[in-house]
């Protein structure tokens, strides 16, 4: 919200497939948009898996993620709606949720069945595509465009197709296939959120070590620690 308020185009992706908390946070909004969005982040991964097996043809990578995306309304106070204003400088906030109520057709499969179809364990096995799959998913996010107001002085048309400035991935906690996908080939930098107790501190260090973040060649990362346990003194 802060990034979108400041004029950035932001896409939030809920890749915490087994505990999609971000999707739950926006549950009311998702229900309001029912019928407008019929696919979710798991569908995106399944589509990417199918596209990779078809030879990773760039023509098969969708430019628009409209069928996956739920747009989050921004406060009117954050938008430039004045006559003669600069609307293309307004921010945007979109969500790619992890679960949606499925359409009532015989072709639909429930969430657990689709998780089985994805089969990340096989993807990251010795004979699986591994990081090639992550790199392919990354192409989907880089290629994504949304409709945005254009500046007629420069583009001679309105609207235009704009790319997201920032994509935020919500990964599953710990060391597992989906976390490896998110912290590996897809992302440019990592934000590690942890608690300040002995279990979390030890687990976070183990995670950082196994993920290669303690080496000199590690990708950029930041550790956000908190909240401070209530039984600690102010000091």
Image: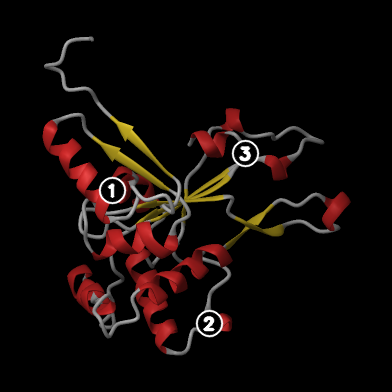
Q: Is residue 189 visible?
A: yes
Residue 25 lies in quadrant = top left
Left or right: 110, with 163 as reference point:
left
On screen, residue 119 above or below 232: below
Q: CA distance from mark 1 to mark 2?
A: 35 Å
Q: Secondary structure at mark 2?
A: helix
Q: Which mark is residue 60?
A: 2
On screen, residue 178 above or below 200: below
Q: CA distance from mark 3 to mark 2?
A: 30 Å
Residue 146 in the image, given as x and y percentages of width and height: 60, 59
Residue 87 in the image, given as x and y percentages of width and height: 71, 41
Q: Quadrant of the C terminus?
A: top left
If you read the primary sequence from the N terminus, does the residue marked by circle 1 or circle 3 appear first?
3
Comparing marks 1 and 3, which lies closer to the viewer? 1
Disc 3 target residue? 7
Residue 200 lies in quadrant = top left
Q: How is the image coloured?
A: secondary structure
Q: Which one is in front, 102 or 156?
A: 156
Disc 1 target residue? 208
Q: Secondary structure at mark 1?
A: helix
Q: Secondary structure at mark 3?
A: loop
Q: Looking at this rendering, what residue extends furthest in the top direction?
A: 234
Q: Which mark is residue 11?
A: none
**Label 1 Cα crowd, 10 Å radius (few <14 / some 14-19 / many 20+):** some
């Amino acid at each position: 919200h802060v990034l979108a308020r400041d004029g950035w185009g932001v896409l939030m992706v809920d890749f915490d497939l087994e505990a999609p908390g971000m999707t739950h946070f926006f549950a009311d909004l998702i229900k309001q948009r029912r019928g407008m969005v019929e696919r979710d982040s798991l569908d995106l991964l399944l589509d990417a898996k199918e596209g990779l097996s078809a030879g990773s043809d760039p023509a098969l990578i969708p430019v628009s993620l409209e069928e996956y995306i739920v747009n989050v309304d921004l406060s009117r106070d954050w938008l430039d709606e004045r006559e003669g204003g600069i609307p293309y400088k307004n921010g945007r906030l979109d969500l790619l949720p992890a679960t949606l109520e499925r359409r009532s057709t015989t072709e639909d499969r429930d969430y657990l069945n689709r998780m089985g179809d994805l089969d990340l364990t096989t993807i990251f096995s010795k004979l699986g595509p591994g990081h090639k799959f992550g790199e392919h998913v990354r192409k989907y996010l880089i290629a994504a465009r949304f409709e945005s107001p254009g500046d007629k002085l420069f583009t001679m048309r309105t609207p235009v197709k704009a790319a997201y400035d920032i994509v935020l991935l919500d990964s599953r906690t710990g060391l597992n296939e989906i976390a490896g996908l998110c912290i590996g080939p897809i992302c440019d930098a990592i934000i590690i959120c942890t608690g300040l107790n002995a279990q979390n501190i030890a687990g976070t260090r183990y995670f950082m070590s196994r993920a290669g973040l303690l080496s000199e060649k590690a990708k950029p990362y930041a550790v956000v620690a908190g909240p401070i346990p209530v039984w600690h003194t102010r000091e």
